[in-house]
Amino acid sequence: MAEPIRVCITGAAGQIGYSLVYMVGSGAVFGPDTPVILHLLDIKPMMTVLNGVCMEISDCALPCVRDVIATDDPAVAFKDIESAFLVGSMPRKEGMERKDLLAANVKIFKVQGAALEQYAKKSVKVLVVGNPANTNALICAKYAPSIPRENFSAMTRLDQNRAQAQISAKLGIPVTDVKNVIIWGNHSSTQFPDVRHASAIVNGQTVSVYDAIKDDAFLKGEFITSVQKRGAAVIAARKLSSAMSAAKAACDHMRSIWEGTSEGHFVSMGVFSDGSYNLPEGVMYSFPVTIKDKKWSIVQGLPIDDFAQEMMDKSAKELCEERDDAIAVCED
């Protein structure tokens, strides 16, 4: 077996953490031959619950799990880690707007950024899951200036998976036969799920999703809104936010970083905007990316029509507002 990877999961006693700890420990992210040392962080009132999670991980007898460190101290949690899933945050409750979360959560990620700066390896790959994820990732990176900002990303893979699943269901094909669905922008109700560049295998032939579905009104209407509002729909049904699907998406995201993307495929993740597609710099925006050697590159040159640009700009505007509000909170 290879040398163990130290992996931190924050909010590890919470709903997403409960699923995520098992998935990471099972080898689903870093591979079945790569041992992991799990650093599990949560707040002091959750430590009894977290100890129960540790018991269950032990009882799973997972071959990849070399050690488990449960703590409420970021200094211990982030010590020498190579991968971080920053899940812990105040969860959104039914009827709560994302902006209501901003003030509470941005301070958490300011503290965690500073702790990463002090204790983590400079090569650490940091995935922010806790909402508002894009802006939390931006703030986290701001307070960890010696870690390359390219090492920080925000999760829109859940939205990508939701969109891909909806297309596969509409076409009646396996989800693996749909590729290159894009999520542009914020992990919020302004996100733009875009299938203009996606393809599907239908009756053994690779065709564009637009040609396969042949329903412009659906793809510009119900499809987009259903993906945008899927999180709220899950909350309305479960009275709890998405957990299993969020943990799966976090694993997919980190595995893509570790393994890279295959030829002809790209994935969506919130990364620092460089101004591509006439979008503002200085925000954490979801783009289609390819990944090689753990480094992402924004896919360039995709044709963008007026409808798409308008949708992309709307999400960018929200992200600029979130960024300005978050920085104001941090500097209070």
Image (cartoon, grey):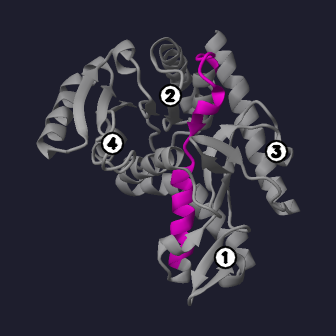
The x, y position of residue 25, in whole percent, is 28, 42
Dot placed on the residue nearer the N-terminal end, 1 or 4? 4
Q: CA distance from mark 4 to mark 2?
A: 17 Å
The mark closer to the camera, 2 or 3, is 2
- Categorize mark 3 by other alpha carbons within 10 Å: few (<14), some (14-19), many (20+): few
What residue do we see at 64% from left, 43% from top? 296
Density class for disc 1 (Cα within 10 Å; few <14, some 14-19, many ≥20) is many
Residue at horizontal 75 percent and vertical 38 percent from the top: 273
Relative to 4, 87 lies left or right = right
Mark number displayed over residue 34: 4
Q: Secondary structure at mark 4?
A: loop
Q: Earlier in the sequence, mark 4 or mark 2?
A: 4
Query: What is the CA distance from the residue labelled 2 to the residue labelled 3?
Result: 25 Å
**Which span is picked out in magenta?**
142-169
Which label belongs to residue 276? 3
Please tell me which residue lies in front, 260 or 149. 260
Which comes before the other along the chain, label 4 or label 3?
A: 4
Q: Looking at the picture, which amino acid does disc 1 mark?
A: Val
Q: Quadrant of the N terminus?
A: top left
Q: Amino acid at mark 4?
A: Thr
Please say if the residues under marks 4 and 3 sit with CB atoms less than 8 Å apart.
Answer: no
| Of the two numbered discs 1 and 4 in the rendering, the one whose residue sits closer to the viewer | 4
Between disc 4 and disc 3, the foreground one is 4
Q: Are marks 1 and 4 in contact (CB under 8 Å)?
A: no
Q: Is residue 224 above or below residue 42?
A: below
Residue at numbered disc 1: 209
Q: Amino acid at mark 2?
A: Val
